Image (cartoon, rainbow, N blue to C red):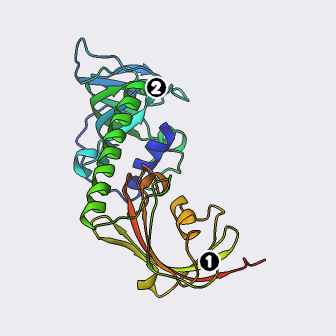
Amino acid sequence: MKKNVIKGISAGLILSAAMVSCGENSGSSEYPGFTKVEEGLFIKYESRVEGEKQVAFGDILTMDLKYGTKDSTLMDTKENGNPFLLQLDSGIYVGDIMNAFSQLRNGDSAVVITGAYDFFTKTVGAAMPEFIDSAEALYFTIKLNSVESQEEAKQKADAANAQAALKEQEELAAYIQTNGITAEPTTSGLYHIVREAGTGKDAEAGKSVKVHYTGKFLNGQVFDSSVERGEPFEFNLGVGQVIRGWDEGIAMMKEGEKATLIIPSSIAYGPQQNGPIPGFSTLVFDVELIAVTEPAE
């Protein structure tokens, strides 16, 4: 997780970072006021919180983080508005910044110095930026805001998901009532509402189907439309090329039919954000089944 978090948050920002004054003072090889954690890694506490939880490997850390060279700032979470999040693991090399993070207690503020070359090539997993010398040091200014064990983080996420799922159910029930929908949902929760009957072939699993559709949220906001693009969408039905709600709903249609499919997140995109679609989103699709054919060989 460490490499994904650090690489995802910092690697892209490093190459496009504006060069601004960092204002740190240090010696060239020794760093007055800093304590040596291990070779190539130094820490100085700005404030130390007694009695607070000492971090442990596997904990989820949330912090304000600013880092750069002696003369430049590469990232500052207070400026971009996104706290830095990582799961602490044991360092993979001598001088790994993780070995300094492991010294912290919840609430601590500190400055950490480590080598630029090892950080970029080993921790971030990227080439050295051209504007930084491989022999330079990096300065990390840290304020540790929260420490959660994996179990605590899971419980927090589970509680948030349960609340979001309940909200989705309430919003769907209100939508059904407001729009006077009398159709009964299937076992999966799908609503299939025929707007204009079709007289052609049944849509069957394994067939190729061509559809026009407009996808909306419950508030009516359109997030995608083949109609607006002027390009019908074609796929093989029942083989997992689309969300489960589409495979189920379109299999209930006949060629030429126009229908509305109301698809809860459990058979759509689930609890995670997917492009413009937030987690726990019930989706409404106005669909026209244009053609049912044999799939291409």
The residue at 66%/76% (across/down) is 208
Please state if 288 lies on the left or on the right of 283 as rendered. Answer: right
Is residue 207 in view from this perspective? yes
Question: Residue 209, which numbered label?
Answer: 1
Residue at the outermost right position = 297
Q: State the count of labels.
A: 2
> Viewer-proximal residue, 255 or 266?
255
Dividing the picture into quadrants, the one containing residue 106 is: top left
The residue at 29%/24% (across/down) is 44
Question: Can you give x and y, in whole percent of width and height, for residue 285 in the image?
Answer: 42, 71
Reply above or below: 182 against 32: below
Please state if 245 lies on the left or on the right of 31 as rendered. Answer: right
Dividing the picture into quadrants, the one containing residue 70 is: top left
Query: Which SS class for mark 1?
Result: strand
Reply above or below: 23 against 88: below
The residue at 24%/24% (across/down) is 107
Q: Nearer the viewer, mark 1 or mark 2?
A: 1
Residue at the spot of label 2: 58
The residue at 50%/53% (across/down) is 188
Q: What amino acid type is highlighted by mark number 1?
A: Val
